[in-house]
Image: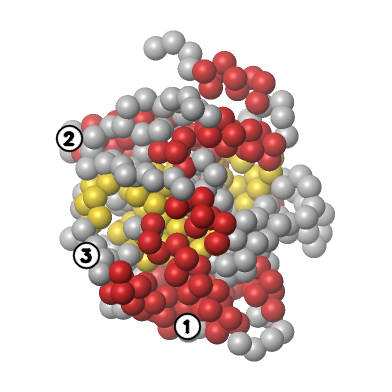
Amino acid sequence: MGRSFYEWLWPLVRWTPAELGHALGLLALRAPLRLGGDAVDDPFEWRGHRLRNRIGIAAGLDKDAVALRGLAGLGVGFIEVGTVLARPHRGNEERPRMRRLERERALWNRLGFPSAGAARVRDRIARTPLPDVALAMNVAPHPLTVRSAEHEPGFAARARAELFETARLLHPWAACFVLNLSSPNTPGLRRQLEGAGFAEELVAPLAAELARLDASARRLAPTLLLVKLPPEDADGKRLDVDGLARLVRPLLAPGSCDGFIASNTSLALARTLVPRPEGEPPGGISGAPLRPLALEVMRALAELAPRHLRVGVGGVMEPGDAVALAAAGAHLVELYTGLVYRGPRFAGLCAEALRRGRSNGDGVSRTPA
């Protein structure tokens, strides 16, 4: 196979600052060019939702739904948009907010939830019909709301109101919502995930609101709710099975979430690979260094939540890494950093590897029980 257009372009892209390169990549995806190959046919169905294959785009790649048609053209089965906030947010002000670590095949970011806001994202999605690709909406409380939680009462009520508003705006196009309280780039956010009553105060009410919206819209397939998990606790300590169980078990009750995405970026790796001045947020690392953590969390999650939908993400830099995540217990696999380094054909290669892995009996997870 000859070199792809992306492979020719990469030597130029790598000399641009990472955040500018990301913006240029999204711009290229908006152009009327076919960058990926044909979609691999490897259907997956769960609770009435049918995907054409098991590979998806992770949250963070297209936060504001500006390049959905181009991403769908990469041959994926689903795209996770966001993180989307109820109202606009510029993210962390200090630059740089992204950095490529080419030697480690990793990305560092401390973007801090930049978002155009749910209303603008809704308008863009409404103008972009995607009949063959499912959309997941990654949502979170606004960072200003999270910051207020440390010194003001009523955090849960304000967070619920924001999540409900975002859900109402995006529900018509969403097969799934993903609640993201595990990003390391909003101070205090992971503390909320670890807090007592999290399931009762945020997850179960959001699940009930989605069920209400489904009933109002007379949907046959329910809108799914997933929770995105971190690879470590709020202090950056690696999650062991007991630590993960403390997060997950309260969310397994009926009326809570339908599944989990594991895992988010690592602040412990960021402290090691991109040292920051004392007191500054360390950011998070994705890419190859995250792979062992993502696999470890997925293996534990498969034991803790055998009947829930499990989506693996983190460190997928080769097609074999997607197969390894699936063998660890992931039903679906998402890409982000691997696409940055490998280019648009990478999604199809991973989808084909998963299809082959299932036919060869390589331990790749099948439909949940």
The residue that disc 1 covers is: 201
Tag on residue 359? 2
Q: Nearer the viewer, residue 188 or 28?
A: 28
**Which residue of the protein is positioned furthest toward the bottom in this rendering?**
153
| Residue 337 position within the rendered picture, expressed as x and y whole percent measured from the top left | 53, 39
Spatial CA distance of label 3 from label 1 is: 27 Å
| Residue 265 position within the rendered picture, expressed as x and y whole percent measured from the top left | 56, 52
Q: Amino acid at mark 1?
A: Glu
Q: Amino acid at mark 3?
A: Leu
Tags 3 and 2 touching, CB below 8 Å: no
| Residue 5 position within the rendered picture, expressed as x and y whole percent measured from the top left | 52, 18
Tags 2 and 1 touching, CB below 8 Å: no
- The image shows residue 266, relative to residue 201, as above or below, that is above
> Dot 2: within a 10 Å radius of its alpha carbon, few (fewer than 14), some, or many (20 or more) residues?
few
Tag on residue 220? 3
| Residue 6 position within the rendered picture, expressed as x and y whole percent measured from the top left | 53, 22
Spatial CA distance of label 2 from label 1 is: 42 Å
Of badges 2 and 1, the one in the foreground is 1
Question: Helix or strand or loop: what does disc 2 sit on?
Answer: helix
| Residue at image location 61% in from the left, 41% down from the top | 107
Q: Is residue 298 left or right of residue 268?
A: left
The quarter of the rendered structure image containing the C terminus is: bottom left
> Dot 3: within a 10 Å radius of its alpha carbon, few (fewer than 14), some, or many (20 or more) residues?
few
Q: Quadrant of residue 54?
A: top left
The quarter of the rendered structure image containing the N terminus is: top left
Of badges 3 and 1, the one in the foreground is 3
Q: Amino acid at mark 2?
A: Ser
- The image shows residue 207, relative to residue 363, as above or below, that is below
| Residue at image location 48% in from the left, 13% down from the top | 3
Q: Nearer the viewer, residue 109 or 210?
A: 210
**Which residue of the protein is positioned furthest toward the right in this rendering?**
277
